[in-house]
Image (cartoon, helix red, strand yellow):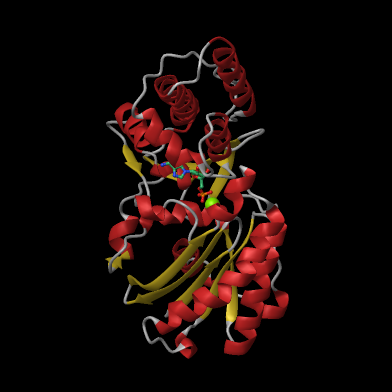
Amino acid sequence: MIILGIETTCDETGLALIEFKNKKFRILNHKLRSQYLVHAPYGGIVPILTAREHRKNLPILYRDLIHEINFDEKKIDYLAFAIGPGLPPALLAGKDFVFRLAIKLKKKIIPVNHLIAHFYSVLIKKDYFSLWQELRKIDFPALGLLISGGHTILVYFESLEKYKKIGETIDDAIGESLDKSARILNLEYPGGPKLEKLAKKGKPIFNLPYPLMLTNNFNFSFSGLKTAFWELVEDIKRYNKLDESTKADLAASYQKTAFEILLIKTKKAYEKFKPQSIIISGGVASNQFLRNLFKKYFSNQKIIFPQKSLATDNGIKIAFCGYFFLEKALEARNLDINSNLKI
Ligand code: AMP
Ligand code: MG
């Protein structure tokens, strides 16, 4: 069986062809185009520009995806499409493309929840791999932490099919908070990876607040942390020049605080739900400092991260996740987006 996966929930246009044969999985080809250069001058994502870019890039990437491997598109069995959550203009651009292609190929569309696809991504390997072997990596019940540009969510997984959300951010997402604090340090969008690089040269010498730590739930808050960081940077600028070494110390301090907030809440959930393994997914999961922090604390527990190159949004995880929801496949005319889709 061959599934074409399509991701257009935010600022990444992703397409992937995945083959599933005898319980083995193979990525036949995939294409990913990030729009960060388009949004960088604005310091964040401009929703309407995402749609323009997706509309422009989807046909080009699809043509390359097929032609590069001399693939006959008639061999596609299903189209898997991330219907949400995401930016409405971006999702609509993707929907138009998927709708037309599904009509042309006379194939059904599997609607995929982008958030669930993030969790399933920890099972994906870049080469030929056995699903059975990969599934053994996760012991249930499992605790899932999704940390991405738009989401910060804790999920309790009784099994891969049965899950419930137990906590989430009440304001900014962790990736968004890293991007905004990076911007305060004049780093380019997307700031997460640049903040990580800069933080390596600094020491976490500045104290920042740990919001919502005393509440009896598993929710997060990052907007107050960002404001405190902004005030700290403004204070420093008032009396000193913001030199490179101070900037590195600030980056290290922000990163440490933000990730410790994630760790403290995850610990709390771990103690209550006593899971057998922990799954951490989303773009921020590519951060090595975060990986080390969690691995150190949960050193005796099974903790699973996605391959770094697969952590951020892409079409591979949408195609892969689609395989588990084949029974949801629908005719193109019934396809709809859901920008507020929940877990
Ligand atoms: P996603 O929404 O899953 O595509 O992830 C995008 C988010 O991940 C953005 O907010 C990025 O800044 C963030 N991100 C990507 N790589 C890193 C990294 N190495 N460290 C911290 N954040 C990162
Ligand atoms: Mg993204």
Q: State the residue in front, 250 or 271.
A: 250
**Does the rendering let one see residue 143?**
no
- In the rendered image, the vertical position of residue 245 relative to residue 94, given as above or below: above
In the image, is 173 to the left or to the right of 295? right
**Does the rendering let one see residue 220?**
yes
Splitting the image into 4 quarters, where does residue 195 fall? top left
- In the rendered image, the vertical position of residue 141 relative to residue 331, given as above or below: above
Give the x, y percent position of residue 315.
Answer: 48, 65
At a point 36% along the width and 46% down the height, the residue shown is 305
Q: State the residue in front, 180 or 259.
A: 180
Splitting the image into 4 quarters, where does residue 280 fall? top left
Give the x, y percent position of residue 140.
Answer: 40, 46
Splitting the image into 4 quarters, where does residue 64 fall? bottom left
Count of marks placed on residues = 0
Quarter occupied by the N terminus: bottom left
At a point 71% along the width and 68% down the height, the residue shown is 336
At a point 34% along the width and 27% down the height, the residue shown is 201
Q: State the residue in front, 190 or 2.
A: 190
At a point 54% along the width and 38% down the height, the residue shown is 179
- Residue positioned most to the front: 241
Give the x, y percent position of residue 292.
Answer: 32, 33
- In the rendered image, the vertical position of residue 178 relative to residue 132, given as above or below: above
In the image, is 191 to the left or to the right of 290? right
Give the x, y percent position of residue 224.
Answer: 64, 23
